[in-house]
Structures are given as structure tokens and as C-alpha cells.
Image (spheres, grey):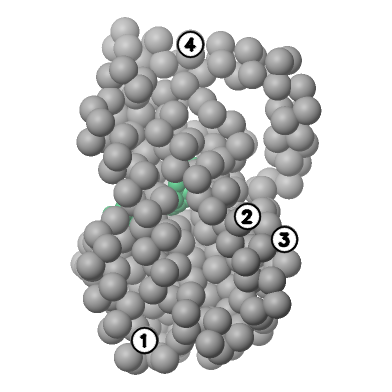
Amino acid sequence: MNFKEKIVLITGTSSGIGHASAIQFAKKGASIILVARRKKKLEEVVEDLKKFNVSTLVCECDVSNKSQVQKMSEIVLEKYDSIDVLVNNAGFAIYGSVSNLTTEEIESQMATNYFGMVYCIKNFLPSMIKKKSGHIVNVASVAASFGLPGIAPYCASKFAMLGFSEGLKHELKETGVGITVVSPIRVRTNFFDHPSFENMPKYSPTSLSAETVAKAILKAANSPRLEIIVPAVVRGAVWMKNTFPYLINPILGSTFNKQLNNKKQD
Ligand SMILES: NC(=O)c1ccc[n+]([C@@H]2O[C@H](COP(=O)([O-])OP(=O)(O)OC[C@H]3O[C@@H](n4cnc5c(N)ncnc54)[C@H](OP(=O)(O)O)[C@@H]3O)[C@@H](O)[C@H]2O)c1
């Protein structure tokens, strides 16, 4: 897909990967629909996009709220009829053991990371199918392949996103609409500003820039693949874990449990 004059909707555009993706798509001449809860932040991103001379639409919307997503989609579809690319990127994590997290904290991660994606797809897919074109890009994580202590509910939401995307990809065969999941390792964004991550190491030398992930999202929007892991070399680690779980899982479990136990002692 050539992105010039294409309509791209990105959730979670007010920060990090979403903001960086808006810049990358705008550089290619796409019109950008910016979706998130913080309108002021979205308007700051629009200022950044002005130099690319592309059309923009700001939509204040909590993607975990079904009726807000429906209202947002009505506004978007009234203006554009259909969109060409839907990037489901809005997401967050709350760090903590399942014993210590409240049920509401667990539910809230599923509500945004998984159901937010479902609501957006339910509202925009019919017009894409009607037009027989378009691509959905779901931003998951390597946490879609590894269940880790301390972020079990977050992993569950990303496993769910990957499973949903795999099933939907089969259903979309021959419709002209594609779907690809982008699964990055740790990225330098505001993601770890959530108070539950306080006093924890936020980034490592291998952490990615939001721009690197944004470029993978553009690639995904033109890809026939189900999942693009960023960086590609991590696909080897996923293969190792799936092939030799009895070797890999104990190593991962004890490494991440150490971090969780240190956090409990804070
Ligand atoms: N950073 C990482 O290490 C990393 C690694 C792998 C995958 N990811 C995934 O990448 C995606 C983007 O995260 P990021 O790293 O760019 O983090 P970020 O800088 O914290 O950005 C998160 C974005 O999601 C939006 N958002 C959160 N809840 C929302 C809701 N209920 N409704 C609408 N928008 C909502 C936020 O906007 P508002 O607060 O304005 O609503 C913000 O724009 C997430 O899905 C995350 O799981 C991140």
C-alpha cells in the first residue's frame, strides 16, 4: 500500500509508539486520525504533524468504553466513509503479582488492551470489507508469547490479542483486508511511568526507540504476515520457548520472579 492520501487511524496517539507512528505515516502523506483520552496531548501531536501538510482529526476516546468507541467511529466514518489502516496501539500495564493486584486492575488491562482492539475492529471492519481493502495492525508485545510473573494480566491481554488476530486473519482470507500483529520487546516510552513500576529498571541497552517500532508498524500495514516481532532476532527466542518450554520456562520464571520478589520488599 502506498500511504499517500490514505486514511490511517491510530489509537494511543498521544504518546510513545502511537505518536511516533503518526509521524511516520504522515511523512508518507497519509491523513491521520488521532485517538486517545488526553485531548491536549493529541493536539500537541497535531502541531508536530503540521510540517507534513496532511489532514488530521483528533478524537478524544477511551477505547475501553464501547459506546465511546462507537461514537468515535461514527464521527470518523461520517468524515471519511472508510479508513485504510487501523492501528490498535492503545495499551498499558500494571505491575504486580496476581495475588496483590485487585480484580479491577486485572480487568482494566483486558478492557483497554484486548476489548479496546475488539471494539475498534467491530466498528471499522465492516466498511473495510465493503471496500475490499485495508489493513489492521495490532500492537501486541513479546508478552504475547511469554507468560511472565509480575505482568501476568498484561501477558494475557496480549496473548488474547494475538489469538484473536490469528483467527480473524483466516476469516479475512479473500476479503482484501489484512491483519498483522507487531510484537516489540521493551521500548523507551512513557509506558513504565505507571506508579506500579516505581523503583524498577525501566530500560536496558537493548530497549528499542518508538521510531523503530513505528517503522515496523508501517511495514506491517503492507504485510501478508500474521506477526512481526521487533527485533526479528527475538523470533528465535519464541521458537526456543515453544520447542523447549521445559528448559526455557524455568529460566524465565526464576529471573522474573527475582524482580517481583525484590519489588515486594521495596
Ligand atoms: N513500551 C514498551 O516497552 C512496549 C513493549 C511492547 C509493547 N508495547 C505496547 O505498545 C503500545 C503503546 O505503548 P507505548 O509504549 O507507546 O506507551 P505509552 O507511551 O504509555 O502510550 C500509551 C498510549 O495508549 C493510550 N491509552 C492508554 N489507555 C487508553 C484508553 N483506555 N483509551 C485510549 N487510549 C489509551 C495513551 O493515551 P491516553 O493516556 O491519552 O489515553 C497513550 O497514548 C501498548 O499497547 C503497549 O502494550 C509497549
> As rendered, which of 245 and 234 lies closer to the eye?
245
Mark 4 and mark 1: span between their CA atoms? 49 Å
SS state under label 1: helix
Mark 4 and mark 3: span between their CA atoms? 35 Å
Mark 1 and mark 3: span between their CA atoms? 27 Å
Judging by the rendered image, the residue that carries numbered circle 3 is 225
Local packing at callout 3 (Cα closer than 10 Å; few below 14, some 14-19, many 20+) is: some
Judging by the rendered image, the residue that carries numbered circle 1 is 77
Left/right placement of residue 114 relative to residue 134 reads left
Between label 2 and label 3, give the one nearer the viewer.
Answer: 2
Indicate the position of residue 123 as horizontal and vertical percent values: 39, 74
Res. 12 in view: no
Judging by the rendered image, the residue that carries numbered circle 4 is 258
Between label 1 and label 2, give the one nearer the viewer.
Answer: 2
Local packing at callout 1 (Cα closer than 10 Å; few below 14, some 14-19, many 20+) is: some
SS state under label 3: loop
